[in-house]
Amino acid sequence: MNITQLLIFNLKAKYGNLVAASRHVGISAATLQNWADSKSKPNMTHLNIISNTTKINASLWISENFLVLSSQSEYTETVCLHNYFRVNIDFYLRQTGKRRRDFVNQYNNSFIDSMSPNTFDGYRSGRTVNIPLHRLEELSTFFNCEPNNLIEVRKHA
């Protein structure tokens, strides 16, 4: 199940159907249906809207254990996902010991959807906020982590 399918699955699990989900998450039913039908794709701005509207941490919406984890979590602050994404990208980049250009070259050899060094810099600096969720999925594959780890609201040591 890809990240968009997982998000749609979790929305349906929580609210029963996409029409009901749209009333709760602040995104139109047509947009949710387009995601379900693969006519369009969500980005991190959409995930941020869903998270802040529902008061459920964004990393949980793309987790396979959504129903269990979301019922056990407290959510008390409005977040900007791209800021956490920036912190987590730097963490995983340091963990691999790679420089930016090395990372981008290796990434481009691994995936069809290439990424320029400027795009990567936009992610790392927080300038780019409309990050497609499929890019989040590719980065998680590259870093060998779950996609929700890249947007998890946490501080790294």
Image (cartoon, grey):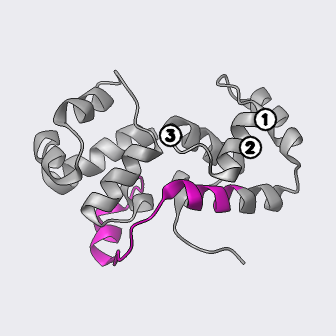
Amino acid under label 3? Asn
Quadrant of the snapshot with the C terminus: bottom right
In the depicted structure, whether residue 118 falls above or below residue 152: above
In the depicted structure, whether residue 21 falls above or below residue 116: below
* Spatial CA span between label 1 and label 3: 17 Å
* Spatial CA span between label 2 and label 1: 6 Å
Does any portion of residue 1 appear in the rendered image? no
Q: Read off the residue under disc 1.
A: 117
Q: Position of residue 150 (x, y in %)?
A: 58, 56
| Crowd around label 3: few <14 · some 14–19 · many ≥20 (10 Å) | some
Q: Read off the residue under disc 3.
A: 130
Q: Range of the magenta residues?
A: 62-89
* Contact (Cβ within 8 Å) of mark 2 with mark 1: yes
Q: Is residue 21 magenta?
A: no
* Spatial CA span between label 3 and label 2: 14 Å
Q: Read off the residue under disc 2.
A: 121
- The residue located at (69%, 52%) in the rendering is 125
- The residue located at (29%, 51%) in the rendering is 10
Q: Is residue 79 left or right of residue 150?
A: left
Q: Position of residue 45 (x, y in %)?
A: 43, 46
What secondary structure is marked by label 1?
A: helix
